[in-house]
Image (tube, coloured by chain):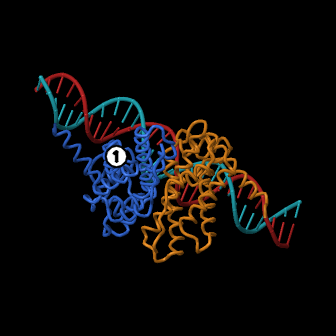
Chain colours: A blue, B orange, C red, D cyan
Amino acid sequence: MTGLRERKKDKLRADLLGAALDLFARQGFAETTIHQIADSVDVSPRTFLRYFATKEDVVVSWVEESTAVFLTSFLERPAGEAPDAALLASARAMLVHYTAKAEFYLTIERAIASSSAIRARKLEMTSTLAEQVTAALAQRTPKADPLQLALYPAVVFAMLRTVIGVWVESEGTRPLLDLFEQAAALVTFRPVSG
Amino acid sequence: MTGLRERKKDKLRADLLGAALDLFARQGFAETTIHQIADSVDVSPRTFLRYFATKEDVVVSWVEESTAVFLTSFLERPAGEAPDAALLASARAMLVHYTAKAEFYLTIERAIASSSAIRARKLEMTSTLAEQVTAALAQRTPKADPLQLALYPAVVFAMLRTVIGVWVESEGTRPLLDLFEQAAALVTFRPVSG
DNA sequence: GTTCAAATGTCATTCAGTGACAAATGTCGA
DNA sequence: TCGACATTTGTCACTGAATGACATTTGAAC
């Protein structure tokens, strides 16, 4: 299972990630070249690009982890549950995951906030996730209007984005889940007539 | 005022824009090079980059127009108006603008939908607009929690994005404002306690 | 240890974007 | 109308991201 080859690969990936985040934090994202990242781990730039399709992906790969948490949670929700309840539950699951790795995600989110290129990339990933969730929702209630199906996920992710933004600005002092409950209290969903 | 120089500049900008959108529509965004765009208007690639900072900006420059409509409208709303009412009113103003130039914005939005690079860029512009609106909101109700201030704009823009998405998919047949009213009926805002 | 597959390095290339400087082209006053 | 002046454009050179092809190294398995 875990031969030397795989272990090396995992380690190299982790090293590249660490070196990249370190350089990003010190010099900024745009000011760091792939060459520098590769150099500080003693590999060729080409190798870096084999592990991460683009420079942004270094940061964004971690967003994938959290979106996976959301999606997994959502697909496991009972079929009879109301869409908004299911979405909110999955959002909470994702924030629990964030909270468990708070220090780490703070670093990631700070890197994201520092560069418009990464911010754009993350927004795009979130919108992809929203599409997946919308598709899953469509399977649960096939008769519903596309607008209704797309709207709830979009709104929930807007809430998540906002909550995480405030969390990062508070340096992680305001508990994520509390913030989310406050946000959820301000927006009400009307039942979908499917 | 309008010397030959300025007129030439305006015309060239318009020509570059037209040529670019045309090529994007036919070949796709990523498959079109700056060189091609410049060639079809008989200018050097360097000149293209003097008119548009990046290739994405060709498309994105038009998003700026619509965001300006939103922001202008929002800043003109009466000070006493409830935040959610003001936001919804400005959203409607923006959609009226979209509807007035429906054919054109359909082209733009199709280009946006076709390329993840542009989609990312547009999302980023929307989030910048959301920040500006949040800042404006903060001036109206200075005592409010940052979370509350940021949440409403984020949700309204999520609604707008969703509505425009459905509109584009319907090839512009479903009226934008109708879609928006349907969306607004599904999500309710609780009053902000500032 | 030999054989096979995966990982890496090297090389070449395309394309976006930037800076510097020269050439061309309007603008405006004499 | 001519000539200084400013603006726009073209050319050249360069950096850096990203991709493809091919050779080389290095684990894996027998």
Q: x and y percent of residue A175 in the render? A: 31, 66
Q: Nearer the viewer, residue A91 or D6?
A: A91
Badge 1 density bin: few <14, some 14–19, many ≥20, Cα 10 Å: many
For the N terminus of chain A, the quadrant is top left
**How many numbered discs sit on the rendered protein?**
1
Residue situated furthest bottom in the rendering: B143
Q: Chain of mark 1?
A: A
Q: x and y percent of residue A102 in the render? A: 28, 61
Residue A9 versus residue A184 in the image, above or below: above
Q: x and y percent of residue D12 in the render? A: 57, 49
Q: Quadrant of residue B167?
A: top right
Residue B86 falls left or right of residue A138: right
Residue A99 falls left or right of residue B12: left
Q: Nearer the viewer, residue B92 or A33?
A: B92
Q: What residue would you read off at disc 1? A: A74
Q: x and y percent of residue A103 in the render? A: 27, 62
SS state under label 1: helix
Given the image, on which type of amino acid does mark 1 rest? Phe
Q: Nearer the viewer, residue A72 or B30?
A: A72
Residue B89 falls left or right of residue D30: right
Q: Quadrant of residue A51?
A: top left
